Image (cartoon, rainbow, N blue to C red):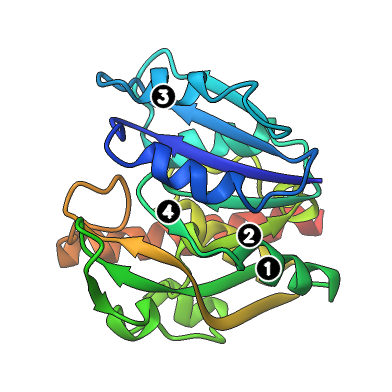
Amino acid sequence: MISVCMATYNGANSVKRQLDSILEQLPSGSEIVIVDDGSTDTTLEITTNLQGTSTIDIRVFVNKTNMGPIKSFEKALSFARGDYIFLSDQDDIWLSNKVSEVMQAFHQGADLVVHDGIVVDGDLKVIDQSWNHYNHNELNQGIVNNILRNGYTGAMMAISKSLVHLALPFPNDIPMHDQWLFAVAKLNKLKVTIIDEPLMQYVRHGNNVTGMKKRRKIVMLQDRLTLIKLIVKYRLNRSH
């Protein structure tokens, strides 16, 4: 069974388009788990109106207070019932072969799959044919390099249920959920597969919930130190 976990917040202009691109390629019996972080536009109405319109089970949960993307994704992951879980932002568009390509990697033993994406602006005009090129992502990273600069983007990531069990609950201070999922996969020697092919249009328009804000150097340093402490603590807890 496939689960798609999506965090939404004021995404009325794009969420229907993204969900349509997902629904058209999910096999019957899959589910989409949406956690809305207190949208004040019509996002919630759009997502709930899709319930019962296909063979895909769309489950919508609403945070009582604004929790931010990390906690929203954690909540969605905790509700996911599938063996294979795709992470999804509300802004993007999945290409028609994304699910089939990622599932092939899972069937070959992967527990974490990450792929490339075509970078587009809010009008879907191509900025770069590769997010990895545009963002200078380093692939085949180890934990140390990933701490210095995360090359794995959550919107292009899918994980196994086994990794979910190992990674939840998220520590309160993790810099970002995708970086934590990668670290946990590496710490537990799980198979990480990189698909060097764009499988989605990755929309960068300035209002994205994740991946847009430039952090100050002092904040980046603090985040790295925090992640190191959390990784050490995780290893110590796993060894007992």
- The circle drawn on residue 102 is 1
Residue nearer the viewer, 211 or 96: 96
Residue type for callout 4: Met
Q: Visible in this render: residue 189?
A: no
In primary-sequence order, the first of circles 3 and 4 is 3
> Which residue is denoted by mark 2 in the rendering?
158
> Which residue is denoted by mark 4 in the rendering?
176
The residue positioned 43% from the left and 75% from the top of the image is 151
Residue type for callout 1: Val
Q: Quadrant of residue 119?
A: bottom left
- Pointers 2 and 4 in contact (CB under 8 A)? no
Determine the CA span between mark 1 and mark 2.
Answer: 8 Å
Determine the CA span between mark 2 and mark 3.
Answer: 25 Å
Residue nearer the viewer, 181 or 79: 79
Q: Position of residue 41 (x, y in %)?
A: 25, 21
In primary-sequence order, the first of circles 2 and 3 is 3
Q: Position of residue 181 (x, y in %)?
A: 59, 58
Determine the CA span between mark 4 and mark 1.
Answer: 22 Å
**In this image, 203 relative to 145: left or right?**
left
Determine the CA span between mark 2 and mark 4.
Answer: 15 Å
In primary-sequence order, the first of circles 1 and 2 is 1
- Pointers 4 and 1 in contact (CB under 8 A)? no
Determine the CA span between mark 3 and mark 4.
Answer: 27 Å
Q: Tell me the element at label 3.
A: helix
> Which residue is denoted by mark 3 in the rendering?
46
The residue positioned 51% from the left and 40% from the top of the image is 6
Residue type for callout 3: Ile
- Pointers 1 and 2 in contact (CB under 8 A)? yes
Residue nearer the viewer, 163 or 226: 163
**In this image, 153 relative to 126: left or right?**
right
Determine the CA span between mark 3 and mark 1.
Answer: 27 Å
In primary-sequence order, the first of circles 3 and 1 is 3
